[in-house]
Amino acid sequence: MSASLKVNGKVHTVDAEPDTPLLWVLRDVLGLVGTKYGCGAAQCGACTVHIDGVAMRSCVTPLARVGAKAVTTIEGIGANPVGAKVQEAWKAIDVPQCGYCQAGQIMSATALLAAAPKPTDDEIDAAMNGNLCRCATYIRIRKAIKIASGQVEA
């Protein structure tokens, strides 16, 4: 089945069933492999993308649910001024270790800062809840969010 999908500002025609998870359309059909498969159950956050600016788990989001909404992946988040600040902060303090979860972490952090430009620690905890990091870089993740928000320096 053919569907139109707007990803990172470009419209794509994809051949996929309506119940196909967005993650597989992004990775297998469009070749955007920055979004990772972690658990397949929306529990780890590795597959987080933005759908109309809202952080969503793409592993459990069927293609049919996306419709005409705009999808942004880690490959396109740097075009967003907030996303660019988050990516710069991540690099400034060397957040990643293995890096597997970092795309999802950056996507969730960007959605947080778009909604709450100067988040409290409680707001950061709530927004980042469910984004798991096997390397436990949570302290650096929090600091990078604070740097991107202008609350602390690198």
Image (cartoon, rainbow, N blue to C red):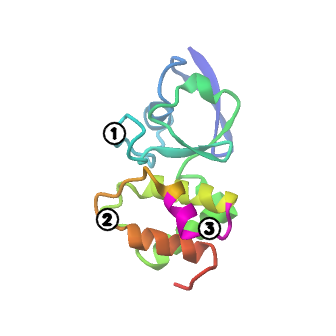
Residue depicted at 66% across the width and 71% down the height: 118
Mark 3 or mark 1: name the one nearer the start of the chain: 1
Specify few, some or many for label 3: CA neighbours under 10 Å numbering under 14, 14-19, or 20 or more: some
Residue depicted at 47% across the width and 57% down the height: 105
Q: Nearer the viewer, mark 2 or mark 3?
A: 3
Residue depicted at 46% across the width and 39% down the height: 31
Residue depicted at 50% across the width and 19% down the height: 19
| Kind of residue at badge 2 | Ala
Mark 2 or mark 1: name the one nearer the start of the chain: 1
* Range of magenta residues: 116-125
Residue 119, label in figure? 3
Mark 2 or mark 3: name the one nearer the start of the chain: 3
Question: Can residue 7 be seen here?
Answer: yes
Name the quadrant of the N terminus.
top right
- Dot 2 and dot 3 residues touching (CB under 8 Å): no
Residue beneath label 1, please? 39
* Residue 129: % across, % down: 46, 53
Real-space CA distance between mark 2 and mark 1, rounded to the nearest whole angstrom: 17 Å
Say if 50 sits above or below 127 in the image.
above
Real-space CA distance between mark 3 and mark 1, rounded to the nearest whole angstrom: 28 Å
Secondary structure state at the residue bearing disc 3: loop
